[in-house]
Image (tube, rainbow, N blue to C red):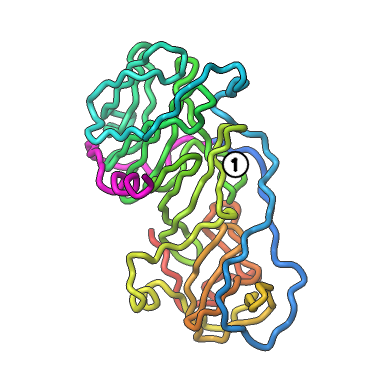
C-alpha cells in the first residue's frame, strides 16, 4: 500500500490559479521551550577511524510544553464502534466538487466543497468550505495541490483532511484539518527546532501510513539542502511530533555519486573541530584537516549536524548552534561557519 500511496502522491496534482506570492503569511502558534544536548566527556584522538556504523540518535527530551490539540477526543470507551478507513481517499480532480462525508462522526453527513477561492491578496488558493455552515478554510496552497482524506485514529470520531502543495516558488506546505464544532481546526505539528506547535508543516507530504506522515522539505543548515523527515501522530495529544530521533535526513537521491560530491559536498578551508564516531559507536573529539570534503547526512536543525567523509568516516560537527532569532544564522565554536568552509551555498 505504501508504494501505491507514494505513486499517487507523485502523480496526482490539482492546478490552482497563480497570480502572485506573499511568502510566509500562514498562521502558527508558538508555545513551549527547546532543550539541547551535546556529546559529553569526549576523548582526544589523533585521527579518525574509517567506519560507518548507524547514526547515533538524539537522546534529548521533547520539551514539556502543553499540547495544542484541535479538539480533545472523548473517552474511547464512550465512543461507538467505528469501522476504520480501509484506504485513504485521493481526489484527483479536487477542485470545484462537493463531497458528502460524516466529518465529525455525529451520524450526519456534511457537504465539503473543495474550491479555488480568492484570498485577501487577490490570489486563488485551495480552499475547503463546509456548505451547511458556510465555514471556510484557506490552505494557502496555490498550485500542485493534493487532497487526502483519511482516519488517523479510528477510536476518535473525526476524519482527517490533508492538503499538500506549493505555496509559491517551490515553498511547499502541508496542513491537516478536522471539522469539529462547526469549524475547521488544524492538527498541530510540533516544531522541535523552536519548541513550538504550528498549524502547518513547511514541506511536501510524500507518504502517509497509519500513524506516520513523511515529508520532503528544504532546510538551511550550512547551505540549503533537500531533506526528508517523519512525523508520528499521537492520539493522546492529537498532535504530530517528529520521529527518527528528531533528525532531518539529507536527500541526495537525485544525484549521481560524482555529482553528489561535486555539487553537494562542502570543503573545509581551515581545521574544523568535530567528534568522530569510532567502531564502538563512541564519539571521539578530533579535527578535520583543511581541504577535507564532507557530505552532511542528518541534522536536528538546532545543535547537531552529522557528516561523512569520502572514505566513509562519520562524525558530528563540534559546537554547531543555530541562531534562535531567525532560524537561519548559525555558529561553529562561536564563529561564522563561513570562516571554516570555502563555500556554503544557500538558496535565496
In terms of secondary structure, what is the magenta stretch mainly? loop
Tell me which residue sits at (47%, 73%) in the image: 295
Q: Residue furthest right?
A: 41
x and y, in percent, of residue 38 in the image: 69, 64
Tell me which residue sits at (58%, 53%) in the image: 246
Residue density around tag 1, few if under 14, some if 14–19, many if 20 or more, within 10 Å: many
Q: What residue range appears in magenta? A: 1-28
x and y, in percent, of residue 291 in the image: 50, 86
Quarter occupied by residue 95: top left
Tell me which residue sits at (33%, 15%) in the image: 131
Q: Residue furthest bottom?
A: 46
Q: Nearer the viewer, residue 143 or 1?
A: 1
Quarter of the rendering occupied by the N terminus: top left
Q: Nearer the viewer, residue 55 or 306?
A: 55
From the viewer's perspective, is residue 274 above or below residue 150?
Answer: below
- The total number of labels drawn is 1
Residue at disc 1, secondary structure: strand
Q: Magenta includes 2?
A: yes
Quarter occupied by residue 145: top left
- Residue identified by numbered label 1: 196
From the viewer's perspective, is residue 200 above or below residue 328?
Answer: above
Tell me which residue sits at (51%, 31%) in the image: 153
Amino acid at each position: 500500500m505504501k508504494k501505491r500511496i507514494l505513486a499517487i502522491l507523485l502523480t496526482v496534482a490539482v492546478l490552482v490559479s497563480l497570480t502572485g506570492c506573499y511568502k510566509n503569511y500562514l498562521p502558527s502558534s508558538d508555545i513551549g521551550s527547546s532543550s539541547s544536548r551535546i556529546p559529553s566527556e569526549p576523548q582526544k584522538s589523533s585521527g579518525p577511524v574509517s567506519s560507518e556504523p548507524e547514526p547515533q540518535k538524539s537522546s534529548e527530551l521533547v520539551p514539556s510544553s502543553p499540547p495544542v490539540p484541535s479538539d480533545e477526543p472523548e473517552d474511547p470507551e464512550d465512543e461507538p464502534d467505528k469501522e476504520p478507513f480501509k484506504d485513504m481517499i485521493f481526489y484527483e480532480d479536487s477542485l470545484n466538487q462537493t463531497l458528502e462525508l460524516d466529518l465529525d462522526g455525529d451520524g450526519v453527513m456534511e457537504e465539503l466543497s473543495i474550491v479555488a477561492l480568492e484570498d485577501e491578496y487577490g490570489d486563488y488558493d485551495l480552499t475547503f468550505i463546509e456548505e451547511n455552515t458556510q465555514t471556510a478554510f484557506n490552505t494557502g496552497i496555490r498550485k500542485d495541490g493534493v487532497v487526502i482524506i483519511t482516519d488517523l485514529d479510528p477510536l476518535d470520531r473525526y476524519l482527517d483532511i490533508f492538503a499538500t502543495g506549493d505555496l509559491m516558488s517551490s515553498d511547499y506546505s502541508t496542513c491537516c484539518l478536522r471539522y469539529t464544532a462547526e469549524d475547521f481546526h488544524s492538527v498541530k505539528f510540533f516544531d522541535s527546532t523552536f519548541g513550538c506547535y504550528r498549524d502547518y508543516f513547511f514541506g511536501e507530504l510524500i507518504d502517509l501510513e497509519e500513524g506516520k506522515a513523511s515529508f520532503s522539505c528544504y532546510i538551511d543548515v550550512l547551505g540549503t539542502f533537500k531533506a526528508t523527515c517523519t512525523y508520528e501522530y499521537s492520539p493522546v495529544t492529537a498532535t504530530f511530533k517528529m520521529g527518527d530521533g528528531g533528525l532531518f535526513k539529507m536527500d541526495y537521491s537525485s544525484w549521481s555519486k560524482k555529482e553528489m560530491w561535486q555539487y553537494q559536498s562542502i570543503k573545509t578551508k581551515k581545521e574544523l573541530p568535530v567528534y568522530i564516531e569510532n567502531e564502538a559507536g563512541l564519539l571521539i573529539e578530533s579535527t578535520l584537516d583543511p581541504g577535507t570534503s564532507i557530505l552532511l547526512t542528518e541534522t536536528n536543525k538546532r545543535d547537531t549536524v552529522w557528516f561523512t567523509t569520502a572514505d566513509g568516516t562519520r562524525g558530528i560537527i563540534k559546537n554547531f548552534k543555530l541562531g534562535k532569532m531567525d532560524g537561519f544564522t548559525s555558529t561553529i565554536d562561536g564563529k561564522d561557519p563561513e570562516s571554516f568552509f570555502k563555500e556554503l551555498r544557500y538558496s535565496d
